[in-house]
Structures are given as structure tokens and as C-alpha cells.
Amino acid sequence: MKKILSSLYVLVCIGLSAADPVAFLSDIQGEIKIKRQGKEFSIESSCEALYKDDVVIPSKRAEGKIVFPEAIYDVKHPSVFKVMLAGINRISGNNSSEAQPITRSIRSAYGPEDENVSALVLPKDLVANVIPAITRATEEVIVYSPKGQLFSDVPDLLIKGIANRPYEASLVKDGKILGKTVTVKSGEIIPFSAFSAGKLKGDEMYEIRIKFNGKIVNAPAGGSFYLMDDAERKAVSHANKSFGSLKNGNSVMFFAANILYKKECYSEVRVMAEKLVKSEPQNILYQNLLKLANKALGYKD
């Protein structure tokens, strides 16, 4: 109940703020408080949105990271930090000094031609009221993942169908089944290794075929997927290293999903977001990341 009330209080504060959030407070270890509009509250999740003029107050032995779309900052007790539009100030008495980021390499997945494009999903987009697309009613079974462009060559399988019904899933290339057929139920996340088909290869198109009682019950057309080219995969891997200082597993997954969303790997984001929401059901950032992935894939839920 305390956690729910805290989340509701944060939402009320967000609703009262005329400005958009500018950063994320993440990788939280110990108790960290936020002072916003003259009121203090404790953060009880692995990731929260921060607004300009928020004051971040780590308690004794507490630490975390403030992540802007372009840079990451360490926050540790006993320092107190004020959030600015594109950085933070370390507050000491009545004086303040600009804190230095621990990394500015988040953009490295994009290259010089994309200097005006944020490397992460902007915080304001993850506190907005996201309205997903409408589920396509023509498909009995929806394949959320894998679909479209993929970063991973061993993507997880995630479908939505009738609850508790056992389906047969097959990996298909050029009309032929690769590896073995696996049994899957709606909402289960199945590792790619279950197909015993090795790894996906570049310059190839694949599909997932779902059957029930011998009949195909998904629509493979438009649901094909392929591996991101090697150069982009290397760039994304390099960008992910920017978050190597993060210790919290949910924080790592959240920012990896951010980068993949910007690279239009929506099916993988969908799987990550579902895991995050299951881990922290009250986290608005994770809920809206899931909605954004659904919308990008063309589904309501």
C-alpha cells in the first residue's frame, strides 16, 4: 500500500508540473528522496522521471544515476543535486557547482548524421498518456516477438492467444521449418534456444508459424523478421556499454529497451517492457514503454 501511495503521489506531482520531465533517476541503491515544489517524497522503484529544479537527496549509503538523453551522472550521499535542463548542479550550502557526467557516449548508436536525434526515448514521452493502436481482430494468435528488425540473433518468443491453450510454434525460413517445433501458451516467454535452430543469420527473412490442432492460427504475412545489419548491431552494443556502470537489472533492461526502441526493434522492446511491468507493476515509465511498443507493433495490448 505504501508503494502504491508513493507512486500516486509522484503522479499527482507530475500532473501539477507545467514542465516536461528532463531526465531519469535510475539504478537506485538505498533510499533517495526527491524535493519537488517544496515537498519531499521517497523513491521506491528502480526508475523515476525527474523535472527541472527537482532536488535529489541521497540518504546515507544511498546512490543512483541521473540519466539524461545525452549523459549519465553519479549521485551519492552526502551530496545533494539539483536537476537542470541538460545536467545537474551539486549543491553545497548556498553555493552550487556543475557536476561532471560519468559518460556522454549514449549517442554512439546513431552517428554524426543523427546529431539532432535523441539517443533515448524522451522522459516526457514515457509519462504521457499513451493510447495504443487497436488489436487486429483478424488474427486469433498475435506474435508479439519476434517481428520486424531485431538486434538479437536469439530473440525470445512471445505470443498472445487463448489463455492456457497449448500452441505449436515453428521457426520458418523460405517455407521450411528450421530446428524443432515447440509448445507455447499465451503470455509465456520462450527462449529462442527452444527451437534448436542455432542463431539467426544476416540477410535472411524468417517467420513464426503458430498452429493449433494442425491448423495455422496466426497470420504470417507482415509478421516476418530479420537481423539488424552488423554495423548497426556493433553501434548498439557500443551504446549499451554506456550503461555499464548500472547495477540494477531493471535499470539495465530499461535503457537497453530505450535504445532498441529508437532503432525500431519494437518486438524486443515489447518483451523487455513486459518483464519490467511484471517486476514493477506500479512503475508508470515501464507501463508506458509497454504501451509504446504495442502501439509501434499495431496492437492495443
Image: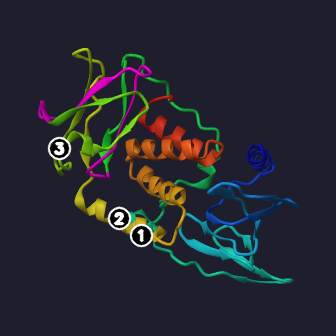
Q: Is residue 154 magenta?
A: yes
Image position of 106 with respect to 159: above or below:
below
* Category of crowding for the residue at label 3, using alpha-carbon neighbours closer than 10 angstroms: few (below 14), some (14–19), many (at least 20): some
- Which residue position holds label 2? 237
- Which residue position holds label 1? 241
Residue 132 position within the rendered picture, expressed as x and y whole percent measured from the top left: 53, 32
Image position of 201 with respect to 118: above or below:
above
Give the left or right position of residue 215, taking residue 264 as reference.
left
Disc 3 to disc 1, how far (Cα)?
29 Å
Disc 2 to disc 3, how far (Cα)?
24 Å
- Which residue position holds label 3? 197
Q: Amino acid at mark 3?
A: Ala
Q: Residue at image x 64%, y 66%? A: 29
Tell me the element at label 2.
Answer: helix
Q: Is residue 164 magenta?
A: yes
Residues drawn in magenta: 151-178
Tell me the element at label 1.
Answer: helix
Quadrant in which residue 44 is drawn: bottom right
Q: Of the residues under marks 2 and 3, which one precedes in the sequence?
A: 3
Residues 54 and 18: in front is: 54
